[in-house]
Amino acid sequence: MVRRTYRVLALLLCMAAFCGFPGSLLAQTGKTITLRMLEAKTGRLIATSHFLVRLDHEKTVHADWVVQNEDGTGKLTVPRGASVLSIQATYDSAMRIFVNCDSDIGEAEPSVRWYAFSEILTTGIVAANRCGTPKAVARLRIVPRPGEFVFFVRKQNVWEEAREFSSQ
């Protein structure tokens, strides 16, 4: 009888430890980053239709991973095992994609830039702003907080809209 009691207690203890284990794993991977999208020339926060998230150099876009706050910022829970992030956003009811300003000016096809989650979580990142004039960019002194990713965008110009329309 005593042996059976010890076995039951040991079994209950193991079950409690095992059930607590997944929760502790989720706590480790449940880190969130704050996304702030700013207009390149003015530095004002822009609300978007959707944030388009890509991870680890994959082509798959995840528009449903970001929870948008009322102030226009977004919260992204870092998926377990993910190391880098690329992000874009949409406007006009998700019909158009903002141009990210971290690409070099004059590129025929803007290149996708990838940012490390580890750096975002420890120090925060402000992406380059190559859309505004040097004087305007110098006025925008954005200091990120740990866990914050700030990026600059602009709306597509007429030629970019025409190119996007003709490729569809």
Image (cartoon, rainbow, N blue to C red):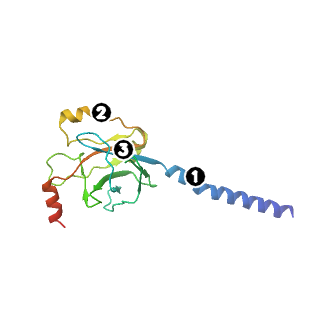
Residue pictured at 45% horizontal, 48% vertical: 32
Crowding around mark 2 (Cα neighbors within 10 Å: few <14, some 14 to 19, many 20+) is few
Q: CA distance from mark 1 to mark 3?
A: 26 Å
Q: Amino acid at mark 3?
A: Phe
Q: Nearer the viewer, mark 3 or mark 2?
A: 2
What's the residue at 53%, 54% (across, down)? 26
Where residue 86 appears, as percent x and y from the top left, is 32, 52
> Is disc 2 placed on a helix, strand or loop?
loop
Q: Residue at x 19, y 40 (%)?
A: 132
Mark 3 near mark 2, Cβ–Cβ under 8 Å? no
**Which is closer to the viewer, label 2 or label 1?**
2
Tell me the residue that label 2 is attached to: 141
Query: Which label is found at residue 149?
Result: 3
Sequence-wise first label, 2 or 1:
1
Asked where in the image residue 16 lies, by quadrant, the reply is: bottom right
Instruction: Out of 50 and 80, give the one closest to the viewer.
Output: 50
